[in-house]
Image: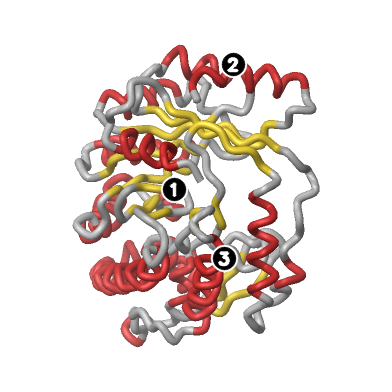
Amino acid sequence: MKKEVFKKLERWWAGEEKKPVIQLCVIKDKNFMSFDEYWPSESAVGDLDSFVNAQLESTKKLEYFGVSYPSLPHQWGKRGTPMTMSAYLGCNVYFGQETVWYKKFVDDWSKTTIAFDENNKWVQASKKLMEKQIEKTDGNCIVVMPDLGDALTCFSMMRGVEQLLIDVVESPEIIIEKIDCFVDAWIQAHKFFHRIYSSKLSGDSSWLLWAPGKTYACQCDFSTMISPKMFEKFVVYELEKIKDYLEFVAWHLDGPDEIKHLDILLALPYVKTIQVTPGAGRPTCASELWIPNIRKILNKGKNVIIYASNVEQFNTLIEHFPSGRVLIGCYGIDPEKEDDRKFLKQVEPYF
């Protein structure tokens, strides 16, 4: 793993790069493995030795350019594991094909304790996975920390979306109280897993990006259903409580429905970067919808992570945003396709 990649990312976080940085992965071998056979069900932790070996083999099927790097994601099988705090705080977990699902269990907030317990079944599953990943990487891959999630989105899984919408209107005091407990538990969880991570690796790695210090891609899927006023009341309240612990705060802006909260986020000095995720089937980062918002982010002196999936999108983004505060992700490039070969040639000068 090239040290200069992380030096460049360190400069990018500091706003010291002169031109956009690029994360680009090229497919070398399309025969990607299925991991589910090594961790088939939620009833028991799978064969982690074979599972992590398969993850390592998968990293060899890609070629990494720019500031991309091989990484071992925090997955239970091939399934994504978003909002793991839901499991760590007591939700029963069910394995789907591509992700995990959580069963709500909170009937009465006053009778619900929000606290981190390292003996929780899923905390232990994550611990064993990370320990095996760290053991096998030999420093050649970044190990990704669990995607802990945020208070309101985890609460919506623990309580149910409809009931939480009622709670934030009718019982905001108890939700604030539980956010206090959640942040304490979140920080304990991050410290717990970061001790494993830092036994061999430098900095910190959220599911989004490596950083030279403690980082997380903060987010709130639940925020699409609440007003900016409620966003300030609950989400910014949570961020204010966690900001002194994290050194490199990113925000995962997940689709057009979250644009209504952008001005609030841009006013927070500790949010260092905004990741723009257009959403499946929605206008791309190179669209008329996102270009003014990306410009707004940069004008506030913040970094931005955006995406291009073809040469036209890339050229549009570079033309509008030549700033060194920009990171452009270009993934899954297939050199057998003529269009992708043109794309690669266009991006090459930025490596």
Identity of the residue drawn at 51% across and 46% down: 1
Q: Quadrant of residue 106?
A: bottom left
> For mark 2, does the 10 Å Cα neighbourhood hold few (<14), some (14 to 19), or many (20 or more) residues?
some
Q: Distance of mark 3 from mark 2, alpha carbons?
A: 36 Å
Label 3 neighbour load within 10 Å: few <14, some 14-19, many 20+: some
Say which residue label 1 marks.
224
Residue drawn at 50 percent across, 72 percent down: 131
Give the mark toward the camera: 1 or 2: 2
User: From this viewpoint, which residue is outermost toward the top?
Assistant: 319
Can residue 44 be seen from the camera position used here? yes
Residue that badge 2 annotates? 346
Q: In the rendered image, which quarter is residue 62 located in?
A: top right
The foreground one among 325 and 229 is: 325
**Are circles 3 and 2 on residues that touch, CB within 8 Å?**
no
Q: Is residue 74 above or below residue 350?
A: below
| Secondary element at image label 2 | helix
Mark 3: secondary structure: helix
Rendering coords of residue 347 (x, y %)? 56, 20
Residue 308 locus on image (x, y percent): 56, 27
Distance between mark 1 and mark 2 Cα atoms:
36 Å
What x and y, as percent, mark residue 161? 48, 64
Q: Amino acid at mark 2?
A: Gln
The residue under label 3 is which amino acid type?
Lys
Mark 3 sits on what residue?
136
Asked if residue 261 is positioned above or below residue 178 in the image, the reply reads above
Residue 336 to residue 349: above or below: below
Q: Which residue corresponds to the image point at 67% horizontal and 61% vertical from the top-left?
A: 78
Instruction: Return the disc, 3 or 2, that comes first in the chain's sequence.
Output: 3
